[in-house]
Image: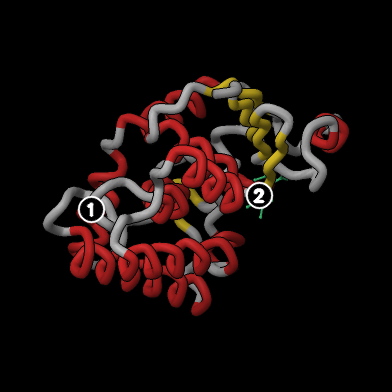
């Protein structure tokens, strides 16, 4: 198989990059990794050398370019035959919750930017943020109780693209506050122990870059 080359943003801040990276890491794929630091005067020019959309993550496999986190996850699932649950009903729900994350949760994204290194940050609770958090807890509890609980710690038992899509939310809860429900708390705790997530965290810890506008919340 040709080499995979994944181009990503800063591990501390690039939530879209984390999704593709953690799926590929979970599936045990060897890949070359290039980090383009975000929010510098050279960022745009560096990213467009690779990605036609001017955004990361971007994947090269042989001569094929794939961009956009969900498209990369889908491609990896096609190439490996892994990434989605086997059962068609579980797979349909996994695709629904992955798509819901891909296209929604604007308040959560805007008000709680992923900031892997930060802890104990407090931001004002707004109706939009509260609704996004409630919906995420509902999704996690529903997936775990209907498809996950008997087969492993993940949303659909075995690790799937759905878990990769929600990995940045796990880091957000770790930075800004724990979820309310017991089920969601248990999911966050299990996901934080995941060696792949820990590897990404270590990478973020070692990065020299800080993006001031992503550093939100009062430390308390
Ligand atoms: N929908 C895209 C969004 C990708 C995206 O917005 N990536 C950000 C980094 S997290 C980016 O490349 N920004 C370019 C820049 O900051 O110049 C995906 O899922 O990959």
Q: In the rendered view, does 199 fall on the left or right side of 62? A: left
Report if the beta carbon of the residue with label 1 is closer than 8 angstroms to ligand 1.
no
Quadrant housing the N terminus: top right
Q: Which residue is mark 1?
A: 157
Q: Secondary structure at mark 2?
A: loop
Q: Tell me residue 126's x, y (percent).
A: 51, 74
Report if the beta carbon of the residue with label 2 is closer than 8 angstroms to ligand 1.
yes
Q: Tell me residue 138's x, y (percent).
A: 32, 73
Task: Pick the residue in front: 107 or 33.
Answer: 33
Position above or below: 187 against 59: below
Mark 1 vs 2, N-terminal side? 2
Please tell me how crowded label 1 is: few (under 14), some (14-19), or many (20+) other residues with Cα within 10 Å.
some
Task: Pick the residue in front: 34 or 204.
Answer: 34
At 40% across and 56% down in the image, what residue appears? 162
Q: How is the image coloured?
A: secondary structure
Q: Tell me residue 196's x, y (percent).
A: 37, 32
Please tell me how crowded label 2 is: few (under 14), some (14-19), or many (20+) other residues with Cα within 10 Å.
some
Q: Which residue is mark 2?
A: 68
At 60% across and 23% down in the image, what residue appears? 2
């Amino acid at each position: 198989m040709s080499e995979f080359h994944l181009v990503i943003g800063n591990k501390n801040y690039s939530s879209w990059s984390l999704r593709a990276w953690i799926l590929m890491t979970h599936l045990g794929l060897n890949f070359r990794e290039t980090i383009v630091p975000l929010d510098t005067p050279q960022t745009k020019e560096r990213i467009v050398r690779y990605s036609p959309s001017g955004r990361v993550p971007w994947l090269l496999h042989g001569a094929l370019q794939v961009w956009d986190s969900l498209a990369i996850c889908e491609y990896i699932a096609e190439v490996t035959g892994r990434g989605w649950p086997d059962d068609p009903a579980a797979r349909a729900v996994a695709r629904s919750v992955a798509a819901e994350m891909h296209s929604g949760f604007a308040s959560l994204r805007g008000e709680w930017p992923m900031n892997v290194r930060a802890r104990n940050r407090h931001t004002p609770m707004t109706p939009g943020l509260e609704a996004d958090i409630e919906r995420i807890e509902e999704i996690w509890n529903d997936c775990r109780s209907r498809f996950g609980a008997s087969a492993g710690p993940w949303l659909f038992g075995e690790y799937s693209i759905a878990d990769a899509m929600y990995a940045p939310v796990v880091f957000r809860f770790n930075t800004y506050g724990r979820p309310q429900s017991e089920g969601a708390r248990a999911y966050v705790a299990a996901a934080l122990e995941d060696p792949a997530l820990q590897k990404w965290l270590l990478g973020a810890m070692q990065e020299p870059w800080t993006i001031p506008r992503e550093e939100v919340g009062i430390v308390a």
